[in-house]
Amino acid sequence: MGFFIETLFSGLMAGMLYSLVALGFVLIFKASGVFNFAQGAMVLFAALAMARFAEWIPAWTGITNLIFANVAAFLIAGLIMFAVAWLIERLVLRHLVNQEATTLLMATLGITYFLEGLGQTIFGSDIYQINIGMPKEPIFLFDGVFPGGILVNQEDVIAALIAAALVALLSLFFQKTSTGRALRAVADDHQAAQSIGIPLNRIWVIVWCVAGVVALVAGMIWGSKLGVQFTLATVALRALPVIILGGLTSVPGAIVGGLIIGVGEKLSEVYLGPFVGGGIEIWFAYVLALVFLLFRPQGLFGEKIIDRV
Amino acid sequence: MSEIKPLKKIGDVIMDVRNISLSFGGVNALTDISFDVREHEVRAIIGPNGAGKSSMLNCINGVYTPQQGEISFRGQSFKHMSSRQVAEMGIARTFQNLALFKGMSVVDNIMTGRNLHIKSNLFLQALRIGPAQREEEKHREFVEHIIDFLEIQAHRKTPVGQLPYGLQKRVDLGRALAMEPQVLLLDEPMAGMNLEEKQDMSRFILDVNDEFGTTIVLIEHDMGVVMDISDRVVVLDYGKKIGDGTPREVRENEEVISAYLGISH
Amino acid sequence: MKIRNIVLASVIAVAGAGAFAQAKEQFFPVLSGRTGPVAPNATPWANGHNDYMKLVNARGGINGVKTLVEECETAYATDRGVECYERLKGKHGGATVFQPLSTGITFALTEKVPGDKIPLITSGYGRSDSADGGVFKWNFPLIGHYWVAGDVVLKHIGNKLGGMDKLKGKKIGVGYHDSPFGKELLPILQERAAQYGFTLLPLPIAAPGVEQKSTWLQVRQQQPDFMILQTWGVMTGTAVKEAQAVGYPREKMFGTWWSGAEPDLQDVGAGAKGYSAVMMQHGAERQSDVVKEILEKVHAKGEGTGPKDEVGSVLYMRGVLGALLAVEGVRAAQERFGKGKVMTGEQARWGYENLNLTQAKLDALGFKGVMRPVSTSCFDHMGAAWARIHTWDGSKFVWSSDWLEADEQVIKPMVKASADKYAAEKKLTRRSGADCQS
Amino acid sequence: MFYRENGQFKTSYRADQQIFPIAQDRWAVLAMLAFGFIAVPFLFDEYMFRAILIPFVILALAALGVNILVGYCGQISLGSGAFMAVGAYAAYNTYVRIDGMPLIVALLAGGVFATLVGVFFGIPSLRVKGLYLAVATLAAQFFCDWAFLRIAWFTNNSTSGSVSVSNLKVFGWAIDSPIQKYLFCLTFLVVFGLMAKNLVRSAVGREWMAIRDMDVAAAVIGIRPMYAKLTAFAVSSFIVGVAGGLWGFVHLGSWEPAAFSVDRSFQLLFMVIIGGMGSIMGSFFGAAFIVVLPIFLNQFLPAVGDLIGVPISTAFVSHAELMIFGALIVWFLIVEPHGLARLWSIGKQKLRLWPFPH
């Protein structure tokens, strides 16, 4: 029982990171109808930038204060992500307006490759660490209730809190700020948004920036857990089923979907894996999504699509 | 144009639409629509925008499934049929906002209309030997007749995407004709055309109607055209049927007039 | 920064080729993995290899024959490795020997080298059964393969427990890279498990291995008495981090020699304290003579391939050893086919098959305390089965065991059996004694 | 002024329905075939064959398969690598488990199994489109990766999970020299290329394109989306599967699932995009481009760096490769969505008018 709870818990933690990546997907899709395959590459890019600047800043400025280095690195990385977002809109999206979804999808595949190459060219391809002073050792709760207690990673808890805070911030941003409302308007209806004078291009830049920040946070958490290296980009592939499950257009969907996938993966691997030789979690997530597709193509929270002739 | 209107014998009811109701998520597109179509006639469905005309055709085509009501064709009635079955029964259709296959040439577009008649299987087609080759040629020949009939010989190999609007409308018609339909559903065949184009199109429609004796169900906005070429007219408004009869009768109908002139009642 | 430091060997090669086009040169191709999931580990290897080759030239070459190096990037992908092999094998008068540094590529090349008559050195990786020279004429897993690693790890664990018999009833988990590389370790462990009566808990980890939570949840659930890691690249570091996250004691974790180098652990730092790994003879050898010599004769001249601080690190040293063996094989071949001549791949093969590096020779070359004697034969293409264990003290590795030798009595039969199976599949006949003289 | 159809009047529809209605084209193609089969073997060295020509021919075949699905039927697939894997492993098992199994039969059997798997994973395409379908096909990818790693039976219980084949023979004629291998693969490519071309200009092909361009309209004129999509999946995965078999048997000789990873799927998709969606020729262009580009960069960039005195590291080269790839994908999607094939046909148009532009 105790172990089951642990598995569940760590599933939720993994899922929470998937949600963060998925969130990036959804934001961009809602606002620009682009399925941004490059989200994973953006996570890598942002994490690399943060990790490296956190190294370089003390070297350059001579200030060795960890907090200062991290904050500065975070800000710089954020700015870099803004620049990336702006360039993507300028050089790619702007030229692909009103293309069908698959074309845009493939364009973002191209962006993925580009960012992976660029990131490693600028920041190198070693393993880099992001040290934001996360406690690494686990703690044990309820020793009394369960034998051996329930293992909890303080790091995961903190990460979860950060993620939650980010989501809260985003929802505030969408509800309260005028830009946020504009974004929602665009998401609901492009033509209408344009007709009431919301400049689409600007909206797109903004939403890609937001996605960039989300990527940065995801990259920071993941990076401080596991170190930053090229392979971080593969989290995009882990997060895809999440969106299918949650629905492309739904922010809560991304979060719930992420948690479900995370838990599903871990439970399946731990309880089913041993019987079939293990290593099943990746495709399990996908098959889960696949089965889902067949019965509810629009996902948990997505809107139904009707073809009109 | 009225003088070219041919005299022809109208047969008995070929299609009967009974109490069709259709709604999308609570919004009623059609409520309790009933009307019939007689063999060889030109039947028009008119009504203001959003009256549910296209939805009506989509129900007949099996694109939408009405929540209530049924449609009977040549006596056998059905609640829902797949578009395939409908096509097999000989009901063809053109589209309001062009639904041609943009990537394909005019010939290929019209050839798709022949697909129902193609028998040879995948492997024969892959090897393109004997029967497959002959079949292909046979249908190509048929398609060439349609191309001549619609006077678009010059554009055979052009991708339809590159054709002017008026010609695309013809190709759309041609694709439907290639199915050798018994009933032809035309969704605003003349929308956005200038006068000559409209005259051409009406001519084609009437020719189809009396050369091949094809029954025609037609959605059209242009009252003049409708009154000229159709034998009977159904009037829809906000998904309800508000009139049915000969052009003359409909023209006199109070509700219809108000619907069109927007008089409240 | 890194980019600027790494002077691409091929550039030197091109320049070199221009400079002494007349000079006799022995071509050693390098299949590098400077990008992709294994970049952090494969890069030092290539740097070490190339630095030693430069050192050999600084020492005056192999009896006057200069070494020539050209790299081709495989990114650890098999098909690219094959392309690189095809590209390099014919260059600069023909490749002497290939060291793919990837089990996948080794498998693919094993099919090709007999046709091209080029030997393969796969020190510590590749096909374990290729130690049987009777079947694998062209493969040389010199000084160790996975089964040696596995056997030594078990031996070390046994010693810690105070006797192999103490292994009885124990549960040992194996976290392995889910690929031929990872799986190659299992046979020896299964063999030993049957022999000593401990239970084996195989835990495959899907490459690239950035997400291992569930693997380590199972570890926490099963609570194996020991964990053996057969991982490579980012997978190792992640494994240690996850172990830390589920509170599995690092003292009970043992890596094979691909899972115990600085790049794996330095960013875990103190968190990895107590983690041990078996080392194929050498470890980090910053104090060894050869390292000093490289620093003074290569890096001091600004010709270092990689960053200076990496010289002498574990994987750097493995590159150095790879180069050493490649060179000494050629030297041995020259003894027979003519001193100061450039050896063909075929001649070099004879050299690798008749390698006899005595301690004296090794010490003279600056490998005192780094390596033990190696001597190969027609049927033994490995030549030595010695290893040591080193342990991470939070910032660096320190030796934690004496020299240990794998039990050839157990491994030889396994090698032979597996080799015979391969020969049967491929319809090959074992080499006769006569063939050994060729 | 020599490239004209002037004076070539079609007297029958058969004549008009030929693959290459213009005589000069027919000659050009025949010449190319002759070149491929007769001249090439004498022209190039072993490296060209092993490292460029053979991979090109095999991947061109695979790209052809993918193009049928993505380019002609408009069903995006990221699982092509998996279908290659199925082809390779199925061929392997039929080849090693049944004594005296002829090579070609084994390869075709591989294709058949790939077809089955392809159709199975194509089923979602009946419900979903575009990116959703992409994800569905990714499921195929990851599942197959896992299955071939984990299920020992597929690899004939080899301890390492890596399988290998050797001494290939066709009609008692050994396929081991690079030239023989090349010709062997080229034959497959030509045969399948011809059949594919026939399909796309027949009823089935028209159904695929109809579904791609306007699926609702297609349904209304009696095309069954299910039939059209599943046949596309079937034909596509059959060809891809055979290509997979060739990749394992002829090119690698010994392989592991990683040889057919998701990267392979992306690579094939890119070949189709760059080469030209909905164009047989395009598949070949795309394959050639993507096979040659990295090798070219690998050798060209260091040379350039050498010239201008800036040492270029291997790492940088392969990163640059990633960037150039990505940039090219985007560039093609923006500037020339129909890929190299379109450039080719534009060239032909110009040639037709030359020297009188109007």
Image (cartoon, coloured by chain):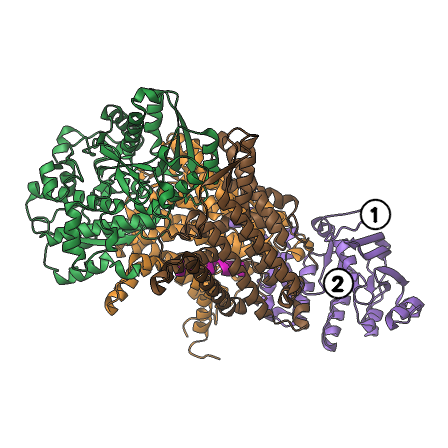
- Write down the residue under mark 1: B75
Residue ID at (62%, 67%): A179
Quarter of the view holding residue A96: bottom right
Residue ID at (18%, 62%): C15
The shade of chain C is green
Question: Residue placed farthest to the left in the image?
Answer: C339
Over which residues does the magenta segment extend? A104-119
Residue D125's place in the image compared with C398, above or below, is below
- Judging by colour alone, the chain drawn in purple in this rendered image is B
Q: Nearer the viewer, mark 2 or mark 1?
A: 2
Label 1 element class: loop
Q: Nearer the viewer, residue C223 or A308?
A: C223
- Judging by colour alone, the chain drawn in orange in this rendered image is D
Q: Is residue B177 magenta?
A: no
Q: Position of residue C177 (x, y in %)?
A: 38, 39
The shade of chain A is brown
Residue B32 seen by the camera: yes
Q: Is residue C159 left or right of residue D124?
A: left
Do the CB atoms of the residues marked 2 and 1 lie less than 8 Å apart?
no
Q: Which mark is residue B186?
A: 2
* Crowdedness near tag 2: few (<14), some (14–19) or many (≥20) residues, C-alpha within 10 Å: many
Q: Position of residue A273 (x, y in %)?
A: 50, 33
Q: Nearer the viewer, residue D221 or D7?
A: D221
